Image: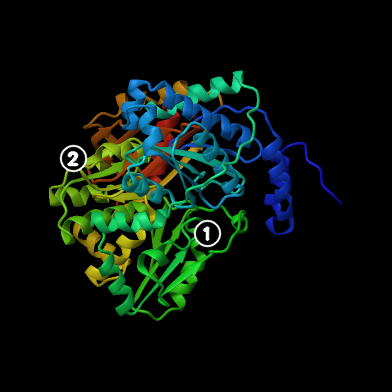
Amino acid sequence: MTMEFKNATDCWKVILSDVTKNRGLLSTIEKFAGGNTATAKIVFGTSGWRGEIGTDFTFNNVRIVTSAIIRMFRESDPSVMKAMGISGFDEVGSRGVIVGHDNRFLGPEFAGEVIALLREEGIKTWYAGEAATPEFSAGIEMLHAACSINLTPSHNPANYGGFKFNPSDGGPAGAEITSKIEKIANEMMKESPPLAAAQPEHIEKIDLTGLYIKYITERKTVDIKRVRDFIEKQDCIICIDNVHGATRGRIQKIIGESDRIRYLRTEDDYLFGGVAPEPSDKNMKGIEKILKESNSAFKLGVIMDPDGDRIRHADEEMIIPMNYFGAMALHFLHVHKGFSGVAVKSVGTSNLVNAIAEKLNIPVRETRVGFKNFRPYLLRTAKERALVCFEESDGISGFNHTLEKDALFGILLAVEMMAVTGKNLSAYLKDIMDEFGYYYPDRSGIGVDRSLTGEVLLNKLSVIRDNFRAGTGVRIGDVQRTVKEVITVDGTKLVFDDGSWLMIRPSGTEPKVRFYIEARTEDEKTALFEKAEKITGDALGIA
């Protein structure tokens, strides 16, 4: 019996309820994507515009957003052009735009529409095909391109499409650019009739992986030869889970084929086998099994998201979240590789890196959540250059590397750590913690009434910083602590005298308050969460 659907959302619900049985319904999604001309509100979040394919992420809406970008180029507002790093429309046209996508459903077709619209305006374009986000960042610099358009929603579920825009420095677009795109696109949504479909007559392809290899070889943050030699000569096993994403095939090209490397989930699958395609602990079961079955001396497992900008590491002993790996990267790049600079982290990340930095006399800079906030420290012209930039949500970049977070970099750096230290990651981490202290980060949160969103919630929570100033005594479980430092970069972070801390910040998208904590022992985590919830309840006037 043929199933009929009123909209793409209902169809996606059926597809995702059983991806094996209902995979054939993707043809229905394609019809919605092409035939649905309903407009959508365009919002560029921390990493681009995202929407459900066939509902708001449609061919017509992708054409509108692309047309809005072209109009932005033509208007050449000085503040926007400065943020873009270009002088105006003519320079965009001559330097060109890289266009590509991850492995999502209809990626090539959406990219074709974008390329056609750009070429109609005389703008040079390169088609990258399926590519990883850090490759776009490196490719922009290597080609001296004006910008890139990468059609990816990163780690979102299979029913989502996405649209990332990167200016000429290769980093995520800042608010000066994205707010302009939003403004023009949303005006066009109201004013414009549906735009005609278009596909380019000619496509100039570009090998972004080849450019990425040249980029990392020139930058010398990771030693590719040392990585290759280690894999060739040492008793090791490396397990890489691509989760059917655009990272597949990249490592083979960078370091060569090896029977010591096992690759998981490299097949074409628009539906990711029915799982959320993110580098979560739950998704690492396949890696853990392979590592435990191996008798190799060195063991490394990694999982990446579909567009290759998030990564999580593991060995036989433990899963190593970015809170720990980012601190390890700082120690490795400074102590073992001799690089100098500052440690840059989002405010919700582990203070293990702070402890390392304090002893090694390295300045620490804490930013708001969002990788784009690291840009000032990753630019080659920066007065304070980052040794490492990382956020707890699995994103990392490093000294002299891309302005985008980069999972490929995360793999190469991990292998080089093993090659130089002669240890598995968990052993290296233990050495670091033995020297600098043990830290146990975690996060949670609570839902609040829908009336408590945006500025209302922000204002209510702001009393926390007034009630808990430096020097304030705080009872946490059975222990009396003193507030050592209050950080208000993003929400309110209370750092206590023993180095533990809690942070309370409103969600930017949901009626929720998020808690980030870090204890000095596993047993203290519960008490910190309870304290964070009590402080939040008092601020909001709820029991």
Which residue appears at 54% of the width and 34% of the height? Answer: 117
Q: Position of residue 496 (x, y in %)?
A: 26, 40
Q: Dot 2: within a 10 Å radius of its alpha carbon, few (fewer than 14), some, or many (20 or more) residues? A: some
Viewer-closest of 303 and 306: 306
Which image quadrant is residue 517 in? top left
Residue visible at 30% across and 54% down?
215
Q: Amino acid at mark 1?
A: Val
- Residue 374 visible, this orientation: yes
Q: Dot 1: few (<14), some (14–19), or many (≥20) neighbours within 10 Å? A: many
Q: Earlier in the sequence, mark 2 or mark 1?
A: 1
Read off the residue under disc 2. 384
Please provide percent x and percent y for residue 359.
14, 51
Q: Residue at x 18, y 55 (%)?
A: 334
Disc 2, disc 1: CB below 8 Å?
Answer: no
For the residue pair 72 and 389, the one nearer the viewer reads as 72
Q: Disc 2 to disc 1, how far (Cα)?
A: 36 Å
Instruction: Please tell me which residue is depicted at 73% across the width and 54% down the height of the picture.
Output: 24
Q: Is residue 384 left or right of residue 440?
A: left
The label shown at residue 243 is 1
205 left or right, relative to 267: left
Indicate left or right for 465 with 11 as reference: left
**Where does the image place residue 437, in percent across and percent down from the top left?**
23, 56
Q: Is residue 207 above or below residue 467?
A: below
